[in-house]
């Protein structure tokens, strides 16, 4: 499993998910996180911190779906071999009052659904390490 | 009472206000008194429409005196949107150093109310939850 919920120091309400690359050189899942609350959630903010770059031109898709799926409703084809030490905004907050808080500016996370990390490229993601920080509201 | 403060599971800092539509074509749906008793600044908000109103009912939501219609938070959103959708309440499209006032933030004085008013159309069938995040300014 290369995507896991972090249990390190308190994140002040942020769900922290560590994503690690692998040596698989075909499109493959990097891990899935089951809805941690067991109720409908709304993701309203998220950031991705690139801790270490991949050696090759693998890419990262993020989203919510069934276990192991290539979900792209949070992020699509983020370069995994760039951005060392930088933070990427994952949920757009460029949203006016009374606008729809839907992809890419918010996302529902159903009770039995997974947050998926997926490398859709036929390139290994070796050495990649990133932390995804997610803010959500419980809608139940 | 069609507007109530939720006391269900922990909302990690969000105030949750449950809204149920009614058959009256206009008038106050309900109100919530400042829950902290000090000046607040509402800095973020969403509304989740679990079940839409049958008609294009526009609910006015804002801060004011008891029973008084206010639209400083929501003014034009029709509540007959698709079921299971989430709508932004406090505008986030604001640059650094700009004023965080309506529609990008709202002050909630210590003795004021969050009022929810049905502007002109029956809201029958509506079930929604308003989530607000605020800072205590005192």
Image: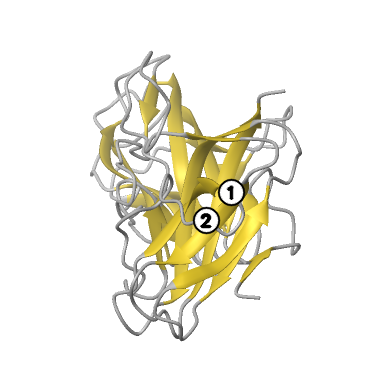
Q: How is the image coloured?
A: secondary structure
Q: Is residue A16 above or below residue B16?
A: above
Q: Is residue B34 above or below residue B117?
A: above
Residue A14 position in % (x across, y down)? 61, 37
- Residue matched to label 2: B68
Front in this rendered view, residue A41 or B28: B28
Q: Residue at x 33, y 27 (%)?
A: B94
Residue A37 image-quadrant placement: bottom right
Q: Would residue B76 appear left or right of A29 to someone viewing this image?
A: left
* Residue A68 shows in the view: no
Q: Chain of mark 1?
A: B
Residue A93 image-quadrant placement: top left
- Residue matched to label 1: B65
Q: Residue at x 49, y 40 (%)?
A: B44
Considering the image in quadrants, where does the C terminus of chain B appear? Answer: top right
Front in this rendered view, residue A29 or B53: B53
Front in this rendered view, residue A48 or B99: B99
Q: Residue at x 28, y 35 (%)?
A: A78
Residue B100 image-quadrant placement: top left
Q: Is residue A9 above or below residue B6?
A: above
Residue A56 position in % (x across, y down)? 27, 27
Tell me, yes or no, whether the two marked residues, 1 and 2, touch with CB atoms within 8 Å: yes
User: Secondary structure beneath disc 2?
Assistant: loop
Considering the image in quadrants, where does the N terminus of chain B appear? Answer: bottom right
Q: Is residue A29 above or below residue A96?
A: below
Residue B132 position in % (x across, y down)? 56, 47
Residue A116: mark: none
């Amino acid at each position: 499993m290369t995507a896991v919920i972090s249990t390190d120091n308190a994140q002040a309400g942020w769900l922290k998910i560590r994503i690690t690359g692998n040596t698989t050189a075909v499109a493959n899942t990097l891990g899935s996180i089951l809805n941690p609350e067991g109720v409908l959630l709304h993701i309203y903010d998220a950031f991705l911190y690139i801790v270490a770059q991949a050696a090759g031109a693998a890419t990262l898709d993020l989203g919510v779906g069934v276990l192991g799926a290539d979900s792209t409703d949070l992020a699509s084809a983020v370069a995994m071999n760039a951005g060392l030490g930088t933070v990427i905004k994952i949920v757009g907050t460029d949203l006016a009052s009374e606008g729809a808080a839907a992809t890419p500016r918010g996302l529902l996370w159903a009770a039995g659904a997974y947050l998926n990390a997926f490398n859709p490229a036929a390139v290994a993601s070796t050495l990649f390490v990133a932390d995804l920080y997610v803010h959500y509201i419980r809608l139940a | 009472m069609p507007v109530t403060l939720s006391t269900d599971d922990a909302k990690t800092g969000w105030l949750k206000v449950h809204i149920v539509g009614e058959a009256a074509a206009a008038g106050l749906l309900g109100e919530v008194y400042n829950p902290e008793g000090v000046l607040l600044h509402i800095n973020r908000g969403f509304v989740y429409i679990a079940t839409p109103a049958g008609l294009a009912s526009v609910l006015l939501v804002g801060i004011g005196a008891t029973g008084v219609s206010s639209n400083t938070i929501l003014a034009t959103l029709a509540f007959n949107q698709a079921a299971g959708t989430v709508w932004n309440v406090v505008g986030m499209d604001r640059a650094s150093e700009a004023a965080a006032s309506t529609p990008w933030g709202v002050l909630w004085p210590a003795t004021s109310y969050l009022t929810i008013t049905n502007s002109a159309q029956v809201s029958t069938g509506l079930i929604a939850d308003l989530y607000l995040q605020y800072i205590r300014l005192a």
